[in-house]
Amino acid sequence: MPGGKIRVLVVDDSLFFRGMLVRGLSSVSDIEVVGEAYDPYDARDRLLGLEPDVMTLDIEMPNMNGVEFLKILLPQWKIPVVVISSRGDLAEAAKRAGAADFFQKPDPKNPDAVKTFLAELPKRVRYAVSKTIPAAPSARTGSGIIALGASTGGTQATARILKELPADLPGIVIVQHMPPDFTRMYAQSLDRDCALKVAEAREGDVVERGKALIAPGGETHMEIQKRGDKVYIHLKRGEKVNGHCPSVDTLFHSVAKDMPGRSTVGVLLTGMGVDGAQGLLAMKKTGAYTVGQDEKSSVVYGMPREAFEIGAVTRQAPLENIAGLIAKYAQGLR
């Protein structure tokens, strides 16, 4: 933004008011509307892709109201927010949730009120940007981790993703449902074809940038454990979880526990059953960016469907787009 325009994301479920806000903000030379969203879930995806300087936010929207969205968003993403709503009685609640400013919507039937509102709107946006809180340490300044799970059809899906990813990414941990010994050969094959270093995980391995570790098939589950500033692999014997050992859920729950927040990415690919859905939900609840493979590109739309239906998926995408989504988000995990 320095020396350039203020980039704004407009969030409102009303097409009429979104249009009014876009016209008002676009009428001044120092502000650019870079995107629009119709609810908080749409807004989260657009925040990731657009990285605006400031956001305007309605309160009464489908799926989640604006105040609740602020409570979830702002601890993880330090962006100034101007709440613009007809609910003047919720102004204090919005500010307590972290809004930089509250601005009441005008009566659209009152031309003078609308004119005054549009003249004041750019000033409110500039004011909010001037109050920006310096970003706290987060995924964009700290280390990160990418966790991936797959089953039926997943060997090809996982291979495609890993082959398309650049080497300079946070460490990747993978549970792919496979028989014993096959995971070692699978990892060796991928290591030859990928920019990333790929290996079958061993007890005590360090999860590090530029390396993907695949859980060995057989009798052990794979977890991560964070000790100090390093993350280690822990393999433990145990009963099957959701019919599988290793289990995607076991891995994902350990990531949610030891690497909570925006420093994590969770990906659930094609597979039969429900393994990974609850773990992905646990990751999302801590602030992770979560991706689920869509039905059309899945060999078996079981695991990713279960995750999607329980609200564990931030972004559902076809297989051909998933590597790009991971890479784009992970550019901030430094």
Image (cartoon, helix red, strand yellow):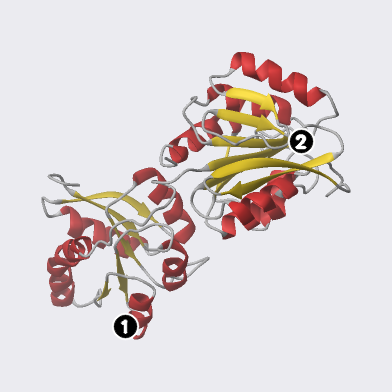
Q: Tell me if residue 268 can be seen.
A: no
Relative height, residue 91 to residue 128 (above, below): below
Q: Nearer the viewer, residue 321 or 232?
A: 232
Q: Quadrant of the C terminus?
A: top left
Left or right for 113, reference 256:
left
Residue that lies at the very extreme toward the top in this rendered image: 192
- Name the residue that disc number 1 marks: 88
Secondary structure of the residue carrying numbered label 2? loop
Place of residue 269 in the rendered image (x, y in percent of width and height, measured from the top left): 67, 38
- Closer to viewer: mark 1 or mark 2: 2
Q: Which residue is mark 2?
A: 151
Q: Residue furthest bottom?
A: 89
**Marks 1 and 2, how far apart at CA:** 50 Å
Q: Amino acid at mark 1?
A: Gly
Label 2: few (<14), some (14–19) or many (≥20) C-alpha neighbours in 10 Å: many
User: Which of disc 2 and disc 1 is earlier in sequence?
Assistant: 1
Instruction: Name the residue furthest front.
Output: 228
Can residue 50 be seen in the rendering of this structure? yes
